[in-house]
Image (cartoon, helix red, strand yellow):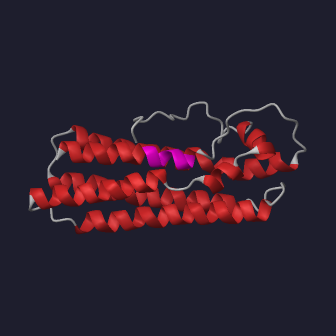
């Protein structure tokens, strides 16, 4: 059981990088103020969601580290996927609510990023449903089911984050890096390198 849930935790670390794509990566370009105002609207809501994502990751890792029963692993994973779904939905709402970013193709960037975050949220909600349906009374079946969930999670972790990367570029990148909620300071970006 433990190796399967460890795989789940590793895959989760990879997918958490999508949320962290919204965190600033520094830059020295001058800002006209509009991008900064837009970034503040988004970044004020990012940090709590990143903490939720990290908390979900920790919960899955802890369930993997302990000699937990199938039922305990199922409960931990289900709650974590629910938190992840909520966090990505909130990130999508933050980007949507901030309005059109003041850059070329701002409307498209916003629309694409919101769609991407909504799709990720829906994917985690789907994984929660799958975990909830696993048979915890049959350890072999449960382990097989977890393996399937881990595969989907790995795919989700590698899924296109192009829209988020485009959103967090140029003037927006500089503006977002100046906002405490999006600054990389204090945000744990570590995770298994094979995720």
Side (left or right) of 146 relative to 18:
left
The tally of labels here is 0
Side (left or right) of 123 relative to 142:
right
| In the rendered image, the vertical position of residue 131 relative to residue 14, given as above or below | below
Evaluate whether residue 97 shows in this view.
Answer: no
Q: What residue range appears in magenta? A: 14-19
Residue 145 pos. (x, y %)? 22, 61
Our reading of the magenta stretch's main secondary structure is: helix
Q: Quadrant of residue 106?
A: bottom right
Q: In the image shown, does 34 or 164 lie closer to the viewer?
A: 164
Residue 1 pos. (x, y %)? 16, 47
Q: In the image, is residue 15 part of the stretch drawn in magenta?
A: yes
State the residue at coordinates (14%, 50%). 69
Tell me the quarter of the image containing the C terminus.
Answer: top left
Q: In the image, is residue 113 part of the stretch drawn in magenta?
A: no
| In the rendered image, the vertical position of residue 86 relative to residue 17, given as above or below | below
Q: In the image shown, does 127 or 54 lie closer to the viewer?
A: 127
Q: Quadrant of residue 74?
A: bottom left
Residue 90 pos. (x, y %)? 57, 59
Question: Residue placed farthest to the right in the image?
Answer: 32
| In the rendered image, the vertical position of residue 9 relative to residue 192, given as above or below | below
Residue 93 pos. (x, y %)? 63, 63
């Amino acid at each position: 059981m433990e190796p399967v849930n460890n795989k789940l935790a590793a895959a989760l670390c990879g997918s958490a990088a999508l949320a962290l794509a919204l965190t600033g990566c520094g830059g020295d370009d001058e800002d006209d103020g509009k991008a900064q105002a837009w970034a503040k609207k988004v970044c004020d809501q990012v940090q709590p969601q990143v903490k939720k994502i990290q908390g979900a990751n920790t919960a899955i890792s802890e369930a993997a580290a302990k000699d937990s029963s199938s039922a305990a692993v199922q409960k931990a994973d289900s709650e974590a996927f629910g938190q992840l779904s909520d966090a990505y939905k909130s990130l999508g709402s933050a980007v949507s609510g901030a309005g059109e970013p003041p850059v070329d193709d701002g409307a498209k960037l916003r629309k694409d990023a919101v769609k991407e975050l909504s799709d990720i949220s829906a994917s985690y909600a789907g994984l929660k449903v799958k975990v909830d349906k696993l048979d915890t009374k049959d350890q072999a079946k449960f382990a097989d089911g977890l393996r399937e969930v881990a595969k989907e999670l790995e795919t989700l972790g590698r899924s296109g984050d192009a829209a988020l990367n485009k959103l967090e570029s140029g003037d927006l990148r500089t503006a977002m890096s100046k906002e405490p909620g999006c600054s990389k300071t204090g945000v744990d970006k570590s995770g298994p390198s094979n995720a």
